[in-house]
Structures are given as structure tokens and as C-alpha cells.
Amino acid sequence: MQHNPKEILRRYLAERGLKITRQRYIILEAFIELGRHLHVDEFYPILRTKYPKIGHATVYRSLKLFAESGIAREVRFGDGLTRYELVTDGVRHDHLLCTACGTITEFESPGLGQLEASIVQNHGFKVQSLQIELRGVCSQCLSS
Amino acid sequence: MQHNPKEILRRYLAERGLKITRQRYIILEAFIELGRHLHVDEFYPILRTKYPKIGHATVYRSLKLFAESGIAREVRFGDGLTRYELVTDGVRHDHLLCTACGTITEFESPGLGQLEASIVQNHGFKVQSLQIELRGVCSQCLSS
DNA sequence: TCGGTGCGTGAAAGTGAATTTCAAAGTTGT
DNA sequence: ACAACTTTGAAATTCACTTTCACGCACCGA
């Protein structure tokens, strides 16, 4: 099994006759490098320094493609922006949103298996995803 | 202490010199009657049967006002729509979203106090709100 | 390696939810 | 009833994102 995002994407594209273009490659590299919770407007100016002709529609299209291929995940926090994060093997995480500075911090939530089990039992629901979102003030903002 | 939404709103408006208009009253009554997780497009046609001249901007404005006054809560599930639910005194709840039929079901999540405490401890975060969102297939859809 | 096929791209136009503008109408304290 | 606001509805605007369309480019096969 292959865990390298570039390799996963290459296979995903090949399997359905899609193409590995210069733009997709550049966007993928930047995405891997820049880290988490990016939305297009944070991302776009950086990409233009690497490839000035790139259009914003292409960035939207590519990030969506990354999500479809499984190497990225769409994250929405209700501010109207769609963010993307790299999918990594490992422990699931959720998000803390600081209402003062806007920072997004990840945290791990132990004991969710139990919660999920009780929901399945009480509601007969087949769970596909579970997401926790906390809003508050981060320690940085609290101490200043 | 007063728990009646109409009374809470009346006070909220009076305190800041805002007005109790026909439209606000109609929208509030319909909101109380129609239940939870409403978005404007579900709501608007129903309101028009009661008051055909009402404009959709007024509905948006009123629901937002209800949220500010504390009688309603904004809920966003990442589909681009803002929904509103009546705030009731009592146990907090979260939401199950059925990916097959779109139904939204409420559930209670025991043991969250513990999770919150561990987050405060690990991240020094002052929590303002905690929200859990589950996606999956509801029992109704599973059995058909 | 040289097309040909058909996917991908960029620019611009289009969407759809929500917000804002503005003139007219309504509400409230006096 | 009057003055001083606020609120309303319609239309225009905003904002993130998607779609369209003509041209460009990637990839396969000979």
C-alpha cells in the first residue's frame, strides 16, 4: 500500500484517464508544503509566485480533485470558506477555533468510540464521519 | 426569569429602542410553530401564505435578530445554508445528518464535560461552544 | 516521434445564499 | 398627532464558488 500523496494522486488520475498537468503538480506540491486548513484565498497568491498564469478556477478544481482522490479532506467551519487539509494516516483529530485571533488548532479527542457506539445503539445510525468543533479563546489570546 | 421567547424578544427590542413590527411577530410565531433546523427557503413560502408582501431580506434580518436576542441559534452544516433552531432551556444536543435522505436528527452526547475538561487542560483553551456533527445513514434509510 | 483524441486551463460569466442600499412606510414616546 | 427614529421590500450587491467555452496540452498508439 502506497501512502505518498503524489503517488496516490498519480494512480487516481491514471485509473480514470485524467491527466497529470503542470498546474496540478504545482498545486499539489504547494499544498503538501504549506500545511493545514488552507482556503483558496490564502493559497492562491502563493501559487501565483510559482506560476503566475494560474487561474483561480484551477485551484478550486484541483483541491476538489485532491479531496476526491482521498489525499485531502474538505473542512468547513461555518464562515463560508472551504478549507483543505492533507489526509495523513494516523490518529483522527478535531479543531479548536479561536474566536479572538482566528487560529485553528488541532486536538485529539479520546473516548469518541464510546460516544459513537452509544449513538449507533440509540438511533440505529450507520456513522460515516464524526466531527467535533470547539470555539473559544486560545491560551495565546488569553494571556495577552 | 422569563423563558418565553416572545417575552424575551420583546424585552430585547425594548432595551435597545427597536420595534415590534407585524413582520417580526409573524416570523417569530411561525418560527416557534415550525420547529427546528429551518433555513430561509423552507420558511419563506410558508410565511408568504400568512403575509404575502413579506420580503426575504426581512426574514433573514429577523432570524438573525432572534439569534442575537438569544431565542434562536444559528446552525451550519456545511451545505452553505444557515439554519435556525429555537433555544430551549434544557439538555444540550447535537446533530445527526443522514447523507441519504437529508434528515437532521438530534441526539444527546453524554460525557462531553470530560472531553471539554481535557481540552482545557491540554490546550489552555477557554471554551465558548462545543459542537458535534455526525454524518451517516439513518435507521429509516438503512431498512429500506 | 508525430499526430489525434479528448481532458484541462484561464478568463469571464453565472450561481445562490446572504447582505446592503434606499426611499417609502411604520412604530413609539411625547 | 407629531417628530424622530427604525423597519420594510425591491433591487442591487457581495462573496465564495462553479460553469462555460475556446484554446492549449497531455498521453496513447502507430
Image: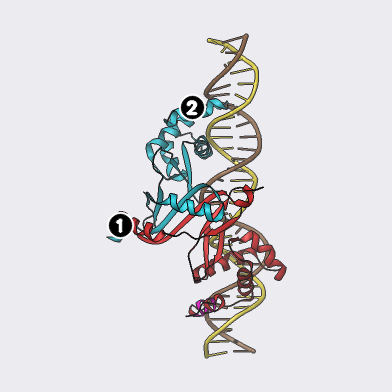
Chain colours: A cyan, B red, C yellow, D brown
Label ID, residue B9: none
Residue wearing tag 1? B121
Residue A127, horizontal then vertical, whole percent? 53, 48
Residue wearing tag 2? A10
Q: Locate residue C14: give its quadrant.
A: top right
Q: Which residues are magenta?
A: B9-14
Q: Nearer the viewer, residue A95 or D12?
A: A95
Q: Nearer the viewer, residue D10 or A110?
A: A110
Residue B134, horizontal then vertical, whole percent? 51, 52
Q: Please state which amino acid type lies under the numbered disc 1.
A: Gln
Name the residue rendered at 51%, 77% in the picture: B3
Where is B59 relative to B104, above or below?
below
* Dominant secondary structure (helix, strand or loop) of the stretch shown in magenta: helix
Protein chain holding label 1 = B
Observer able to see residue A49: no
Density class for disc 2 (Cα within 10 Å; few <14, some 14-19, many ≥20) is some
Density class for disc 1 (Cα within 10 Å; few <14, some 14-19, many ≥20) is few
